[in-house]
Amino acid sequence: MIKLVQVSKSLFKLSKLLFLFFIIFFIADFFYEGPDCPPIPPFYCDRPENIYDHLYDYSYGILNLLPSLIIIVAVFLFIVSLFKYVMFFTSSKELDLQKQSEIKKSIFYAVMAGCLTFSSWYVFQLASEFFHPVYLAKPVIYLYPQQEQDIKVQLNYQGKIIADYPEYDQKLKGWEVTAYPDGKIINHADHQEYSYLFWEGKPNQPINWDLSQGFVVKGEDTREFLQNTLSQMGLTPQEYNEFIVYWYPLMKNNPYNIIHFAGEQYTDIAPLTITPQPDSVLRVFMVFKPSDKKVEIKPQIFPQFERKGFTVVEWGGTEVK
């Protein structure tokens, strides 16, 4: 029968190997850019390009899943070992020194395996966040009611709001405003006038943006591309000009930009609830990744957007590093 102390010791050795794996991956990740979409479990990206992308995806998946398994087993071994230790002392049987030593070692190895694994995983997460930060940058919300109207805009963002204007009300999870047909907004909290509601956020979890569809555009052609595409999607000149003024400087010097306009991937992590309910809503969220070379991807097709009645328009974006 396999002894408990042998299992705990083996788990501790595995945790040390995992620690070494974390270090190797961290060094490799510093020099390797990774595939076009950041990987999350279950282990793979939708569109790996070569063997290195496959290795990157599987390694990232292992480093997210294996620590959880080791910690669960370590906690189980600790509880079992501690229970045995207590049972021996509360029973009438005498605990010989060898068994006492084995149980203590089992407890020690289980604790060390859990602590080493958790600390390695935590440092890895902090390092990944530092080198590969993901932000949802400058989503702005325009409100166009048919007449002057009090409106409640609630944003249940799955992450942390890191910038806002006007101030995002944490209790309300949004803003209460009076909006006008020309887009003017009066915020109830400070009674100031605004052109739109601005927010910027950092998601709780990495997002595996689907870049399998979209457009590959030369950096120098990005301005004209955005003018044409955003207009086709339904933005007005004022709206797409404000979009371009913000994003074009970040894209123009790249050899190429892989551009995708996210749908449910974005709206699922940033659901909007607007009261009264608007008649038409357009949410444009651009995901782009700089590229040194031109790649072939399937072009996106957009449904026709019609502005009718009370209309809400939002645009924003993020860069995949």
Image (spheres, helix red, strand yellow):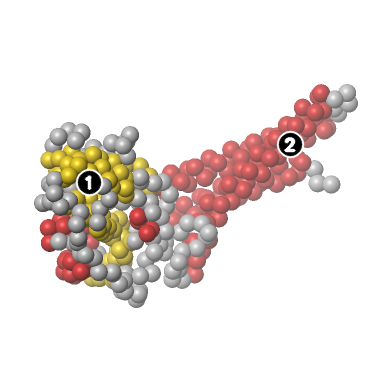
Where 181 falls versus 301 (above or below)?
Answer: above
Residue 226, image x and y in percent?
A: 20, 66
Say which amino acid is labelled 1.
Phe
Residue under numbered circle 1: 198
Q: Position of residue 224 (x, y in %)?
A: 16, 69
Residue found at x 63% / y 43%: 72
Tell me where residue 36 sits by quadrant. bottom left
Q: Which amino acid lies under the numbered mark 2 shown in the image of this protein?
A: Val
Task: Decide if residue 94 is on the left or right side of residue 274.
Answer: right
Q: Would residue 109 be seen by someone viewing this image from the given angle?
A: no
Q: Which mark is residue 80?
A: 2
In the depicted structure, whether residue 200 falls above or below residue 99: below
**Depth order, front residue of 148/141:** 148
For marks 1 and 2, give the CA distance: 53 Å
**Percent position (x, y) of residue 307?**
19, 61
The percent coordinates of residue 5 (x first, y second) are 75, 40
Q: Is residue 140 above or below residue 259?
A: above
Q: Residue at coordinates 80% horizontally, 43% vertically from top-left?
A: 3
The label number, if any, that marks residue 226 in the structure image: none
